[in-house]
Image (tube, grey):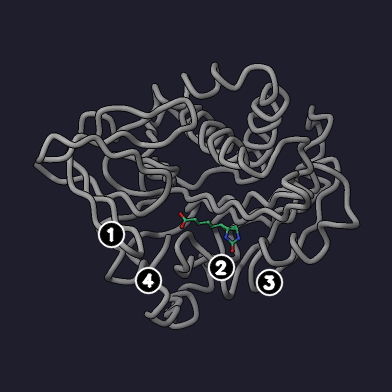
Amino acid sequence: MHIESQRKDKSHVDSTANIGHIFKEIPDLLPAEIQRGLNTSIIGKTIKYYREVKSTNSIAASMADGVEDGTTIITEIQTRGRGRIGRTWISPRGGIWLSLVLKPKIPASRAYRLTIAAGLAAAKTIRTYKIDAKIKWPNDIIIGNKKVCGILTETKAEAEQIKYAIVGIGVDANIDTRLFPEEIRDSSTSLQTELDCAIDRVEFIKKLLTSFEYEYLRLYKQFPQILDEWRYFLATIGKRVQINNPSTTIYGKAIGVDREGALIIKCGDGFIERVVAGECIHASI
Ligand code: BTN
């Protein structure tokens, strides 16, 4: 769940007196459990597990040069989880906070493909729980109009080629949404809230890693198929949207995405805008 960076991370976790007994009921995400029966050949072959870190994306980046493709960093708690556009990502116990170290042989200009693959994998995984998860452009996984999962991709490139990419995925899994900070309580949800029961996080992670690997392996030759499936999950198309970028705000109707996943917007003055990044807000009317 994210809040704007200028607001302090008032992680409700530490400030809530009677939460301890809830935490004890959540089994840990031990790598051996996740790897038991995990049928992947790259993703999650190496898993590094931490009880608490600042940010799994930061840990992943610090070790990326020396680890193999698909190395997965998992933690129970992030004290400085990072979201897109410089936001804080609140990451209490009960969520799924993980980062994948990836070494794909693709140009840096195509790094967006990894985010799209991760968004598709996350949406498909959530749908296995019979939840109608959709994607809000560019890559928030939403249930109804509430966010349940976010993705942060960071890359290091050399000579236009990706040296490594870190794909960070945060899922509000077993989190009591009544404990969300007020500013995000109405715009976020959790799997536990939607299902009215806690999920098995180990099972979820196994599904997510398997689903991501499937997309990762077909990234080179079948990206148009990935994009088609991703487009099918997009809740944004046909909606009136506001796109906030550091330099501009664009209003209009989202009429499609192009073959690079950029959002095509028809503005009130009839102009067509192509947007590659930014915060997208769905208008309620
Ligand atoms: C977003 O703003 O929607 C992206 C949120 C990404 C959060 C995940 S949690 C695991 C990884 N580590 C981080 O610090 N951020 C990502």
Locate the C terminus and report the quarter of the image it occupies: top left
The kind of residue tagged 3 is: Val
The kind of residue tagged 4 is: Glu
Residue 91's x, y, as percent? 53, 65
Residue wearing tag 1:
248
Q: In this view, does 43 lie to the left or right of 280?
A: right
Q: Is residue 101 left or right of residue 285?
A: right
Residue wearing tag 4:
4
Which mark is in front, 4 or 2? 4
**C-alpha separation, residue under disc 4 versus residue under disc 2:** 12 Å
Which corner quadrant of the image does residue 142 belong to? top left
Dot 2 crowding, Cα within 10 Å, few <14, some 14–19, many 20+: many
- Which numbered tag is attached to residue 81? 2
Q: Which of marks 4 and 2 is nearer the N terminus?
A: 4
Most foreground residue, 271 or 194? 271
Q: Mark 1: which secondary structure? A: loop
**C-alpha separation, residue under disc 1 versus residue under disc 2:** 26 Å
Residue wearing tag 3:
53
Q: Earlier in the sequence, mark 4 or mark 3?
A: 4
Dot 4 crowding, Cα within 10 Å, few <14, some 14–19, many 20+: some
